[in-house]
Image: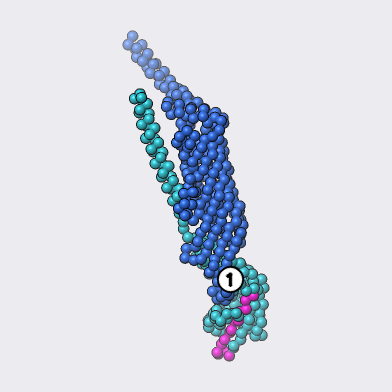
Chain colours: A blue, B cyan
Amino acid sequence: MRQRRISRYICTLLISLLCLPAGAKEKQEVIPPAPLFCGVAVFADLTGPIMKAMGSKFNQMEVGARLNFRDHYFPLCELGIGESDREGLGNSNQFHTRAPYFRVGMDYNFNKKHNGNRFMGGLRYGFSAFRYDFSDAAFADPVWGMAGESLNLEGLRARTQWLEFSVGCETKLWSIVRLGWNLRYKARLHQSVSHYGEPYYTPGFGKNGSSAFGGTVNLIFDIGRTTKKHNKKDNENIRK
Amino acid sequence: MRKTDKVHTRQLRKGARGIGMAHCLMLLLSFVLLSCESIDCTLNNVVTCKYAFYSSSDGAAFTLADTLSITAEGTDSVLYNRGSKVKSVSLPMSYWQETDTLNFRFYNRETGLDATIAIYIKKSNTPHFESPDCPTTMFHELREVTYRGEQGLVDSVVIAHPSVNYASKENIKIYLHTAD
């Protein structure tokens, strides 16, 4: 009798242990999948106008748009205007450029929950074809010293292509308004420049070099047909 | 409001405050990243044309036993003054002239040598810049070199490397008649 009782306890314990992970798994799978197309968003980078107001050596005004598939895949395009007016330190050199740039790519949201917060990783391809000016008012021959030969190079052409790897996150502020930031590592793929010299700044890329770091702080507006429904679902999920 | 709702709202506020802080930090970091700057100028930013002396008999590098002085037409400056035991010499080029004329004066008190040869260097000039912070320079591309002067002193003058830039390579080789 006693032995039968013990064996019954052991059986119950084993069955409950076997059932526990299955139950937990069922709980995890409760999160409903987002619809295939979750809407469109437009966004603008806030760092550009602030940097321009602060008198930075270069700045870029940037807007973009992206699609939202399953709340995980975000194909996007970004368009901006980069500008730089730079005077040399302790000399009379001046560099100027103002040109558009383009980026296309995709972000991936690593957050499995549809709770309004997104942890993003992304890859972008950037391109800019631009002209730049360089001048040196005090450019003179130190030995022969021929007069009045200041250097003024205008409309020098350059093309740059690069890849950007980004990580960041974003959160819902209110209704359709979201705020997000990301950090970017930029690797130059190809550049063709004038034989007079390389540009100091490449629009969209930053200070010219084989690689660069950057970042954006984006104000995002979710628009599109499924946004409202999705927001409701978001709110419900947050309450849960 | 139910107790669970209150707790949930408090958690949300706490989370939002944390996210707000993270956003502020990232904004600051973005500015720092975008405004970081360093000056990367080439250390060797002097552009000179290098002339080297060779023996015409065996083609080997040659050290002058004479005293050498070099002046340029179009300027009062003495580019090289009374150098002795010279193997090679690096001289500036004019920024805007198409042809530079350099007068090489070889002087030797013992042998009584006092000869001057004029070397004419045809070239193109290209301004070059690295960055607004770095000095602007002039690069040159040598096209033709000829000489005129004392017979029996110089055998030939040839272009070894036509590009005159930051790389300090031998640009012009001067082959001299030497007593073996």
**How far from the left and from the top, in percent, is residue A151?**
57, 67
Image height of A126 relative to A57, above or below: above
Q: Foreground residue, A151 or A13?
A: A151
Q: Residue at x 48, y 27 (%)?
A: A233
In the image, is A12 to the left or to the right of A101?
A: left
Q: Chain of mark 1?
A: A
Local packing at callout 1 (Cα closer than 10 Å; few below 14, some 14-19, many 20+) is some
Q: Residue at x 39, y 32 (%)?
A: B12
Q: Is residue B100 magenta?
A: yes
Where the C terminus of chain B falls, by quadrant? bottom right
Image height of A111 relative to A207, above or below: above
Q: Quadrant of residue B2?
A: top left
**How far from the left and from the top, in percent, is residue A37?**
57, 31
- Provide the secondary structure element on which disc 1 rests: loop
Q: Quadrant of residue A154?
A: bottom right
Q: Amino acid at mark 1?
A: Glu
Q: Is residue B124 magenta?
A: no
Q: Farthest residue in the front direction?
A: A53
Whether residue B107 is visible to the viewer of this picture, yes or no, is yes
Q: Main secondary structure of the magenta part?
A: strand
The residue that disc 1 covers is: A149
**How far from the left and from the top, in percent, is residue A29?**
48, 25
Residue interval drawn in magenta? B99-112
